[in-house]
Amino acid sequence: MGRNIFYVPPVNLMGIGCLRDLGPMLQEKRFMKALIVTDKWLRRNGITDRIIAVLEQHGIPYIVYDGVQPNPTCDNVHEGVKVFQDNGCDVLVSVGGGSPQDAAKAIGIIVTNGGHISEYEGVHKSKRPSVPIVAVNTTAGTSSEVTINYVITDEKRKVKMVMVDKNSLASISVNDPELMVGKPAELTAATGMDALTHAIEALVTPGAYPVTDATALAAVELIFRYLPDAVENGQNIEAREKLVYAVFLGGLAFNNAGLGYVHAMAHQLGGVYDLPHGVCNAMLLPYVQEANAQHVPRKFRPIAQAIGFSVRGRTDEECAEFVVDAIRGLAQEVGIPKRLSELGVTDPDLNLLADNAMKDACAPSNPFQPTKEEVIALFQKIL
């Protein structure tokens, strides 16, 4: 089976109310000043204030950078670096979903390594660990708070740059479902389907191994069971907590096994057309897995079993068909759009999207390597 490395943050706070455990932990570390990295929506809606209250209660000075965009850009990163350096900060506290988390990772890498963020596209390009990052998760979806991956949009090239870098791993992750209660149904659905994509891609990739399979399968089971409840009732704290665990488990899986062509393609839709990442993943997921099932049908048997299919006496192909249909059904149940036209994109540049997808850092870990024509055909399925 070979040798494997399993990356995970050293400390992970999980469960209802765990944010309250963060203050004493930070106080012990004697940080001089924190840069809170977040976005304007979270600032306006009071979520950031809850983290600020923890810092103030424990005497930790801070300054806020709330300029992160939904698809964080190079400019966002370097603006954040300037705020960090100009104010004598020594720790990053990222508050939000994938966008603030990714921006904070990039800021931390630049602070300790220098240069421009575009220099770090690819795998393990930095030489020094980021400044300490405390990743406070507010959406159950991206898993950025527990992974070594981050994505930054190069606004000039209109490309989402994927960085896989062990030096960007957070020191502490905070996964408190109380921060997610009341999130809009659309956001809950998109982030939940993003988490499902992480888990399923981690299961079918050649890089999977028993530890990642175990965490990914647990994530799949939890998402199918609890995502509809969380979407239907945003105040359902039990469903929110179960999704927190699912996102954590799925994040551990893909962080160490890899992803695939769903992400490789979704990154391009986000980079070129500024579309929501989770929605793009959800739209592409059944079609890419349908193609993957032609090459590794056996990988879908445990997935089918995890979501309630009686696999005894069934072929691998029947299991794969069940999984693809179940993904479509869940996406429809939680209200995911089916076509790019519903997102305002009616005439996408398929050649550009396919070319960039094939260069994406997630592409090599797909179970098979499609031709450009096959990638274009997959994009056409969501037109």
Image (tube, rainbow, N blue to C red):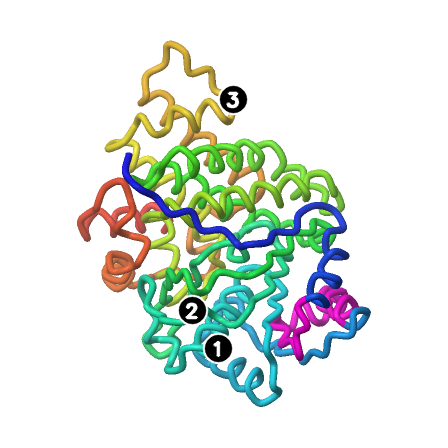
Q: Amino acid at mark 3?
A: Gly
Give the mark nearest the N terminus, 1 or 2: 1
Q: Nearer the viewer, residue 175 or 195?
A: 175
Give the image quarter of residue 164: bottom left
**Magenta segment:** 29-55
Instruction: Tell me the tag on residue 77.
Output: 1
Q: Is residue 45 magenta?
A: yes
Left or right: residue 354 versus residue 236 is left
Name the residue tied to disc 2: 152
Instruction: Kindly report the distance in space between the C-alpha atoms of the residues bearing marks 2 and 3.
Output: 37 Å
Q: Nearer the viewer, residue 184 or 199?
A: 199
Q: Quadrant of the N terminus?
A: top left
Q: Determine whether the residue tagged by mark 1 lies in a helix, strand or loop.
A: helix
Instruction: Kindly report the distance in space between the C-alpha atoms of the residues bearing marks 3 and 1.
Output: 43 Å
What's the residue at 28%, 57% (across, down)?
357
Q: Is residue 8 magenta?
A: no
Q: Determine whether the residue tagged by mark 3 lies in a helix, strand or loop.
A: loop
Instruction: Tell me the tag on residue 308.
Output: 3
Left or right: residue 214 versus residue 242 is left
- Asked whether the beta carbons under mark 1 and mark 2 sit within 8 Å of each other, the answer is yes
